[in-house]
Amino acid sequence: MDFNDTPEEATFREEVRGWLDANAKQRAPGERIPTLADDRTGAVAEAQAWQARKADARWACITWPAEFGGRGATPIQNVIWKQEESRYAVPPNIFTIGQGMLGPTLMVHGTPEQQERYLPKMLRGEEIWCQLFSEPSAGSDLAGLRTRATRDEASGDWILDGQKIWTSGAHYSRWGMIVTRTDPDAAKHAGITYFVVDMQAPGVEIRPIKQINGATNFNEVFFSGVRVPDENRVGAVNDGWRGAITTLMNERASIGAGGAAGPGYGDLLRLAERISWNGRPAIEDAAVRERLADFYTRTQGLQYTGYRTLTALSRGQTPGPESSMSKLVGAAMRQQMAAFALELQAASGALHDPAFAEDEAAWQAAYLGAPGGRLAGGTDEVMRNIIAERVLGLPAEKRQDKGLAFKDVPTGPQA
Ligand SMILES: Cc1cc2nc3c(=O)[nH]c(=O)nc-3n(C[C@H](O)[C@H](O)[C@H](O)COP(=O)(O)OP(=O)(O)OC[C@H]3O[C@@H](n4cnc5c(N)ncnc54)[C@H](O)[C@@H]3O)c2cc1C
């Protein structure tokens, strides 16, 4: 493990800081990273303006190859960029699904025409993209998807019917990338085709999902006879699983490079110092100190495990299974830390109006958002399966659907 920047990394960091200093304001200590929350217009426009500014200076999508407008930056340079940008008061990045996952998929599986049409506007944030993968009965088991695409022989177009769910940002997205069932007679993974779909096409209906924290970041999306031209097909007919895997690999990489938003251990410590318990600062209570010590130990463990990933990236290696461990431990710990912060706040922990709650209700938001963190990008159980099979070498799960045509896979009643 190596904690220091190499001379090249230090030079790159200086260059990044130079540009950010000239173009943005550093966040004040304790100033929170803004979230998109529920603002459907103003916040999106602000994020787009910041993205365009970065694009003008070639600081947008730096890992993209130069031919697509990036700098061909290395993964470690990308980590440095994100570390530095997070120190400035800039709008939240609402483009990661397109730029981090769908754009790279188009680079590998898209036609030159698709790349030319979509990538430049994706890079500038001018057109926002969403990922139409999950369905009510296909999440962890994505290949169980049932949204149909049927060929209209007369026009050559494809007609989409079905439902997606948990589609982040569908309500402000111009385009989506969707995986569909095109051959139910083929085995589960073999009859899937991948498309670019116009989110404003007739027959697309976007219904917001109201979350426990009051925000509506994701949606149900219904497709009723939606016409998609064949030129929007990404990859060969019935070969969409290959593209889906590219997208999912990039999703893991983007989550790994992102770093967790929201309050951290330092904020918890300050809260315990500030808040009073029985007339004394809470931090003087032995039970509180014990919990803090436990969180500190785990935070440090996660930080050093993160450094192992960074060291691998810095040496041009592919990070190992430690990213699954970090995801599993980190997501659960953030939830436990937020719950403890609310306990410390006693009755006022029930407040969630930023004007009245401690730390502008950041802990309340973290507590309500934490369960989502344990699902997105692979649930706790899926992470455990990965660790069991790929790290510990335990036998793989039994698969009931192996070798069966999709239409013959046993299932419960379908709507
Ligand atoms: C914040 C957030 C944003 C998201 N954004 C998007 C998006 O933009 N686009 C999109 O397509 N999807 C999105 N999703 C959906 C996400 O991909 C799914 O939630 C995830 O794949 C899990 O699927 P599921 O919710 O259907 O749960 P299921 O897969 O139905 O799982 C239900 C439970 O069963 C467990 N389980 C499942 N399989 C196994 C197994 N083999 N072994 C043991 N236990 C198992 C799970 O761990 C879980 O506890 C988002 C989710 C969240 C939380």
Image (cartoon, rainbow, N blue to C red):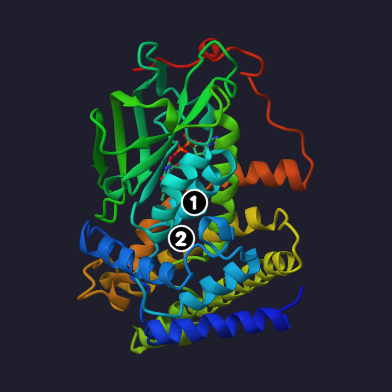
Between 362 and 209, the one nearer to me in the picture: 209
Q: Residues within 10 Å of mark 1 (few under 14, many from 20)?
A: many
Q: Is the residue 248 above or below the residue 405 in the image?
A: below
Task: Identify the residue under disc 1.
Answer: 374
The residue tagged with tag 1: helix, strand or loop? loop
The image quarter in which residue 299 lies: bottom right
Tell me residue 343's x, y (percent): 38, 69
**Vertical placement of 362 versus 415: above or below?**
below
Real-space CA distance between mark 2 and mark 1, rounded to the nearest whole angstrom: 9 Å
Q: Residue 298 placed where, x, y %?
A: 61, 69
Whether ligand 1 has any atom under 8 Å from the Cβ at mark 1 is answered as no
Where residue 377 sits in the image (x, y, percent)? Answer: 52, 48
Task: Specify the farthest residue to the right.
Answer: 393
Residues 188 and 409: in front is: 188
Vertical relation: 64 (above or below) 288:
above
User: Which residue is painted at 48% across and 80% down in the image?
Assistant: 266
Residue 182, relative to residue 116: is it above or below? above
| Rendered residue at 41%/70% (across/down) | 56
Q: Amino acid at mark 1?
A: Arg
- In the picture provided, is 43 more to the left or to the right than 102? left
The residue indicated by pointer 2 is: 335
Which quarter of the rendering shows the N terminus? bottom right
The mark found on residue 14 in the picture is: none
Mark 2 or mark 1, which is nearer to you?
1
- The image position of residue 274, as x and y in percent, is 37, 87
Query: In this rendering, would 152 be left or right of 249?
Result: left
